[in-house]
Image (cartoon, rainbow, N blue to C red):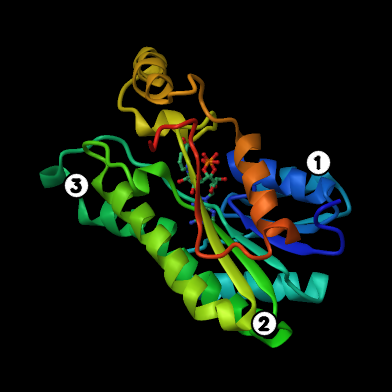
Amino acid sequence: MLLKEKTAIITGGGSGMGRAMARLFAAEGARVAVADINGEAAEKTAQEIGSRAMAIQVNITDDSQVRHMIEQALISFGHINILVNNAGVPMSFVPIEELEEDQWTRTLDVNAKSIYLTAKYVVPHMKKRGQGVIVNTASIAGIRARPGLHAYCASKGAAIMLTKALAIELAPYKIRVNAINPGPADTPMLSKFINGGQAQIEKDTKEVFVNSVPLGTLIHPGDIASAALYLCSDMARMVTGEVLNVDGGRGI
Ligand SMILES: NC(=O)c1ccc[n+]([C@@H]2O[C@H](COP(=O)([O-])OP(=O)(O)OC[C@H]3O[C@@H](n4cnc5c(N)ncnc54)[C@H](O)[C@@H]3O)[C@@H](O)[C@H]2O)c1
């Protein structure tokens, strides 16, 4: 039981990696708030877990909704030990001159601004307790670019640097901040990086994504959950400002 007596908020907990994290954290003894813009999906994950979980519907780009998420978790749990900023949105290939400003803003808001917003409301609580762990799900795309994914790459690069900036600022308060860079992973998001129908998705999944991973397979959501578990547990008590690639070697 690596997270006995701990409490955690996991954003994007209704699907993919967030769902795997919520299940694993609960199995390791934590009480978990499964937060997602898709309230039904959050509810479903929470119900699968049972009494150790609660669902919160939240748009993590909205200041007042984020504040409410933190307040709800505090009311239910009494304290918050762990926050995982995992929710994110993908983008598929688009030439830079055709990228609409809306898409740029939305991608940066969900994937990067949300980390600032959640910190704004959870850090005062963590500072008061003199402890806390924040983990951000960034991406290998934050350090290795792909053509046509500019906004996504920029948002994840921002998430990585924000992780380090928060880690150095919050270390005196014993708040640790780390990031995980997943490589191409077998979740509902992967197909959304690909333009085209089912045949194109199957072709690119194999030829672009699987073939880009030296270890030869897509990353499993459970691989990311295991990395998050380590970073959130006391086993990583002296690890902060670190970015852990869980990418089958894609980032080498
Ligand atoms: N799947 C991959 O190949 C891959 C690779 C590298 C990094 N990532 C990153 O991993 C994280 C998890 O992705 P996943 O693959 O599990 O995707 P997913 O699509 O399965 O899950 C993402 C979840 O985030 C939620 N979400 C989206 N916008 C939100 C918002 N504004 N407010 C609250 N919730 C919101 C969605 O409803 C969804 O449940 C993301 O940050 C993603 O960018 C994914």
Q: Is residue 171 left or right of residue 222?
A: left
Ligand 1 contact, mark 1 (Cβ < 8 Å) = no
Q: Is residue 237 left or right of residue 46?
A: left
Q: Which of the 4 image quadrants contains residue 172?
A: bottom right
Q: From the viewer's perspective, is residue 1 above or below residue 71?
A: above
Q: Mark 2 against mark 3, which lies toward the viewer?
A: 2
Name the residue: 40% across, 32% down.
Answer: 250
Q: From the viewer's perspective, is residue 168 above or below residue 113?
A: below
Q: Mark 1 against mark 2, which lies toward the viewer?
A: 2
Residue 125's mark?
A: 2
Name the residue: 81% across, 76% down.
Answer: 78
Residue ID for mark 3: 99
- Is residue 15 shown to the viewer in this render? no
SS of the residue at dot 3? loop
- In space, the residues marked 2 and 3 are separated at their CA atoms by 39 Å
Q: Residue furthest left?
A: 97
Quadrant placement of the C terminus? top left
For marks 2 and 3, the one nearer the N-term is 3
Residue 48's mark?
A: 1
